[in-house]
Image (cartoon, rainbow, N blue to C red):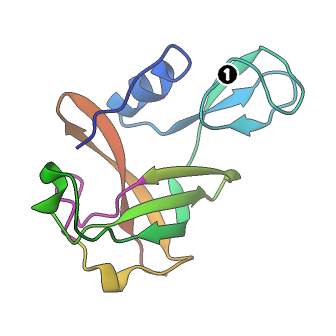
Amino acid sequence: MLTPVIDEDGAPFWEYAARGELRVQTCGACDEPRFPPRPCCPYCQSFDSTWRRVSGRGRIWSFVVPHPPLLPDYAAQAPYNAVLVELSDSPRIRLAGNVVAAPDAPLDSVDPARLRIGAPVKVVFAEIDGITVPRWLLERG
C-alpha cells in the first residue's frame, strides 16, 4: 500500500479514521463540505472550519481495475479495484479507496465484475502499516 502523506490540514481526517469515524472538513462560515482538506474555503474564502461526521454511505462514482505493469507491491494483489465514492450526505465529496469483502480483506477480495457505477457502498476501516484507512463494502441495493 502507498502510505498516505498526512499534512497539517488533513491530520484530523486520519485521527477520526483511527477512531472509526468518517468526517469531512466543513466550512464554519458557509457550511459547505470540502475535500481534500485545506485551510481556506473554496466557496466563501473563510478560514473557519469544523469536521462533520458523515454517514459513511455512498455510491461508486467511478472505478478502475489496474492491469500490469504494476508497482511490485501491487502486482501480487491484481486484479484489484480503485474506486471513487460519492458520499450520500455530501455529494460534492468523492473519496478514493478500494472495495473489499471485509475491513481487513486483501485488495483482490472482491471480483471486479461485481462493481458497477452507482453501486451503494458503506465505509469500514482497516489499520494498514500503522495508519487507519477507509475502505468500502458493497451494500445490497
Numbered-mark total: 1
Would you name the residue on which mark 1 appears?
A: 50
Kind of element beneath mark 1: strand
Magenta residues, start to end = 97-109
Vertical relation: 105 (above or below) 30: below
The residue depicted at 32 percent of the width and 68 percent of the height is 66
Vertical relation: 55 (above or below) 22: below
Residue 88 as seen in the image, left or right of residue 63: right
Q: Quadrant location of residue 121? A: bottom left
The residue depicted at 31 percent of the width and 79 percent of the height is 112
Residue 52 percent location from the top left of the image: 63, 32
Q: Pick the quarter of the image with the N terminus.
A: top left
Residue 91 percent location from the top left of the image: 70, 56
Residue 28 percent location from the top left of the image: 79, 21
Residue 12 lies in the magenta stretch: no
User: For this rendering, which residue is in front, 43 or 90?
Assistant: 43
The residue depicted at 33 percent of the width and 40 percent of the height is 133
